[in-house]
Image (cartoon, grey):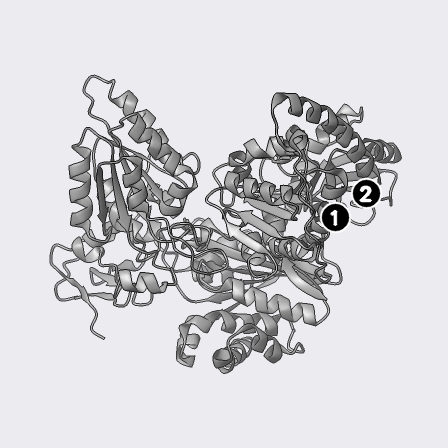
Amino acid sequence: MTKNVLLVGVGGQGTILAAKILTQGLLEAGYDVKMSEIHGMSQRGGSVSSHVRYGEKVESSTIEPGAADILVSFEKMEALRELKFLKPDGIAVVNEHEMPSMPILTGDAVYPKDAVEEIKKHVKTIVLNATQMALDLGNGKVANIVLLGTIIKAMKLENIDWESIVKKQVKPAFVDLNLKALRCGMDAVNL
Amino acid sequence: MKYLLTGDEAIARGAYEAGVHFASAYPGTPSTEILENLAKYEEICAEWAPNEKVALESAIGASIAGGRAMASMKHVGLNVAADPFFTFAYTGVNGGAVIISADEPGQHSAQNEQDNRNYAKSAKIPMFEPANSQECRDMVLESYKLSEEYDTPVMIRMTTRVCHGKSIVECGERKEVAIREYVKDAKKYVCVPANAKVLRRNLELKLAKLKKYSETTPFNFEEIKSDKVGVIASGPCYHYAKEVFGEDASYLKLGFTFPMPDDKIRAFCQKVEKVYIVEENDPYIEERVRYLGFNCYGKDLLPKYGEMTPDVIKQGFFGEEPAVIAYDESAVVGRPPTLCAGCPHRGFFYELGKRKNVMISGDIGCYTLGFAKPYNALDSCICMGASFSIGHGAQQVFNMTEDKKMRVVSVLGDSTFLHTGVNSLIDVIYNNSNAVSVILDNRITGMTGHQENPGTGYNAKGNEANMIDIEALVKAIGIKHIRTINPNNLKEVSDALDEFLALDEPSVIITKWPCALKKFSKEDKEEFPGAFTKKMVVNRDKCIGCKMCMKCGCPAISFDAENKKAVIDGIQCVGCGVCSQLCPKDAIEWKED
């Protein structure tokens, strides 16, 4: 069976790097892997998503509505926006980080503070503050790796040698930090 | 070796393996990464051209000289390059030549949706349509063989999901290909009518041979599993259809779609009871199937626009809606793309948007976002390099009205100016327009992700290059009123607009400040010392909560409604200083280190 991982967030949050490391690990574990993402205009503070699909043989590179096994949202409101992509029995991972969009900043709309409560009503939900965890580790930028850790745990992919894959993808000086971030994310998931 | 590659990376890899000597492109989503990856190979001379027409023309020159050449562009780029494209079909090649067209079904990052398969048919240039990264690599290698064997340029039509989708690719090694001998041959390369008429006739003979190729190439293949249901698909639609129809249906997967394999299509349609056509954009395959006399299901049921992802196919053909979680989505707020914190366009659009009786003619780039709230500072945006000419035409008509109250300000970026905007500025000076033309020079090609251009002083390989001096170029064209300003200084912006809007002659404002995301070159560091090194902070004792600072639309500024104070996000702020100029109480201050 093909497994579907959907990473969503805001341009600049590092969803692409997290998806890249994930797909590299899946490739080395022998899976057929496809990934789809959109670059360009949406990078400028817009909503972004990376679709990762793996299994014995994968056809489409995109995930259909109602088909994601796991939805990992790097930003709280984005989780609510993309919840329609999650399977009714799928898992939602939500980073409790709020990034108000322009209509909210200009006062035309209000940030949905209760996003997590709405999601929890419908699906199994893991809530964490990956941004704070990353800051506690000394670098807010590795929030994406913390969230990658949650995917690895939730999708039972711990057997893949992530340490060697991370080493190939990040600069030597940041390997330890990234591995710690990965561990943090894995520890945040208790299923 | 197996790699996980995007389609764009796989195209570059295929070109590398095929021994390509020369490649040229202008950046455009989703094709940009092809040239970026080609530039990484030492063996290939890979260049950014000022526009797609120039890119294709230099590739044609490289081919005539005997090298293997590639030109890559986004779908609308081929409109710009259409002139050489059509005649290149007549001359054919010396070294193999491949043109990549990256189409955008669903318009993720483009001003329109067009099906460039029609270009291949119209120009009579053979065409491949890859479905995944492996096919991207394989079809490039095949294209060069085909190009040289049949003496024709070859087009590869990609789409966004193929360009930016990753899948596994089995790669090989580069095989060096000798540069072919250059032979002067006016009958082949000089397209005067006498020669071109002969070439036109010969083109039909080539197409007849290519038709035979289309019938036999393994890139057009059948999978017969059912005599009930048959699907004909091209590009990623083949994979989408497989998700829907599964392994029990029969498929005719078309990877080479001009000329079309009519016999293969006939044979397939006769083997199955029902034929479904899945393709993105126009009913290109469908029209051929109907022309051959077969009934089918296609665009009568599926949308004629957008992507044909599995959910769209299920909905269109079978009326099936996906089972999704029923939740309250009403609280979700839109997240449109915005000018980044520190964007040098912000100060300019803030001032420009305040003007009354001004039509603002816009263009393609990050600054197109100036149309949105809170600036509302763009009235039109059609295509690359169009703002000055559209602005000129509009001003000519406004000048015919009785009160003559409407003035035009036309805006475009540095890369867009050098793309085709320079031609429009020549129109402005030649026809003595009093429209104000503005070049927003942020020292880089921004929207596509920071590619060098003729104005940056660096080339596609990251090496130093001759730099076009935009101000000197504008002067050389004959513009007398030129002002180069810092767009973060609102008074400079306002004064320049006041002064030039009062003129009755052509004028150009150049706003010069680097993109906030740009990696500074050593020249940037010298020219803009201290830029983006400090941050700003709100002095909460002075802030009166008037929200004036929020009118500049910076994503780093939000409002603490509880305490009625503005807040600057210290992570996003890069210290452009625009917001501090709006504060009536001087409450926005430089942050102490």
Label 2 in the same subunit as label 1: yes
Q: Quadrant of the C terminus of chain B?
A: bottom left
Q: Nearer the viewer, residue B306 or B326?
A: B306
Is mark 2 in CB contact (under 8 Å) with mark 1?
yes
Q: Which mark is residue B142?
A: 1
Question: In the picture provided, is B253 more to the left or to the right than A37?
Answer: right
Q: Nearer the viewer, residue B161 or B256?
A: B256
- SS category of the residue bearing label 1: helix
Q: Nearer the viewer, residue B462 or B243?
A: B462
> Residue at the spot x=19%, y=28% of the render?
B504
Mark 2 → mark 1, Cα distance in angstroms: 10 Å
Marks 2 and 1, the one that precedes in the sequence: 1
> Residue at the spot x=27%, y=28% of the render?
B433
Amino acid type of the residue that numbered disc 2 sits on in the rendered structure = Thr
Question: In the picture provided, is B272 more to the left or to the right than B84?
Answer: right
Q: Tell me the chain of label 2.
A: B
* Residue A86 in sight in this render: yes
- SS category of the residue bearing label 2: loop
| Residue that extends furthest to the front in the rendered view of this protein | B184
Amino acid type of the residue that numbered disc 1 sits on in the rendered structure = Glu
- For disc 2, the marked residue is B217
Query: Residue B591: percent from the left, percent from the top?
Result: 21, 70
Query: Residue A32: percent from the left, percent from the top?
Result: 72, 63
